[in-house]
Image (cartoon, rainbow, N blue to C red):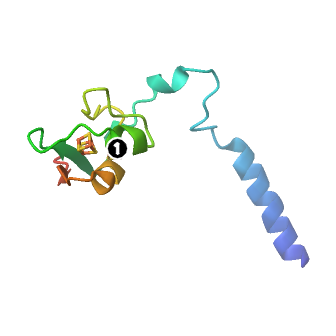
Amino acid sequence: MPKSKKSRNSKNSKENEQLPIGAVITRPGSSVKNKTGSWKEFRPVRDEKKCIRCGFCWMFCPDNAINEKFEADLDYCKGCGICANECPVKCIAMVKEEK
Ligand code: SF4
Ligand code: SF4
């Protein structure tokens, strides 16, 4: 490895050590305190009349943000749209968040 690249890597390593640790779950069950809903650009809106209560949205949500009534908890929903994509009757619309 050329010397200049090695010294650059060494400098980056020292800078990296000074970065604060982020997004680390240090205690079981503590992720509920990390409300991640503010990240989203879109939110899911379900048409309750069309919903057949199959549970696919609940099953596929990677953030466990959908409750037993198939409502999204917007404090944790990141707006990924997986629920809308998996819904067999397409009753979930992803609506742009207004900030
Ligand atoms: S996937 Fe669609 S139809 Fe199924 S429970 Fe969820 S919203 Fe209702
Ligand atoms: S948009 Fe993504 S995070 Fe939000 S409820 Fe649907 S699947 Fe879960």
Tell me the residue that label 1 is attached to. 56
* Left or right: residue 52 compared with residue 41: left
71 or 51: nearer the eye? 51
Q: Compared with residue 73, is residue 78 higher up or lower down, i.e. above or below? A: below
Q: Position of residue 74 (x, y in %)?
A: 28, 34
16 or 87: nearer the eye? 87
Q: Position of residue 93 (x, y in %)?
A: 18, 52
Residue at the image point whose x is 82% and y is 73% from the top:
5
* Left or right: residue 99 compared with residue 78: left
Mark 1 C-beta to ligand 1 under 8 Å: yes
Category of crowding for the residue at label 1, using alpha-carbon neighbours closer than 10 angstroms: few (below 14), some (14–19), many (at least 20): some
Give the image quadrant in which the ligand numbered 2 is located.
top left
* Left or right: residue 59 compared with residue 81: right
Element type at mark 1 = helix
Q: Position of residue 95 (x, y in %)?
A: 17, 52
Q: Amino acid at mark 1?
A: Phe
Given the current orientation, which residue lies at the most extreme left position?
Answer: 49
66 or 3: nearer the eye? 66
Residue at the image point whose x is 60% and y is 30% from the top:
25
Res. 23 image quadrant: top right
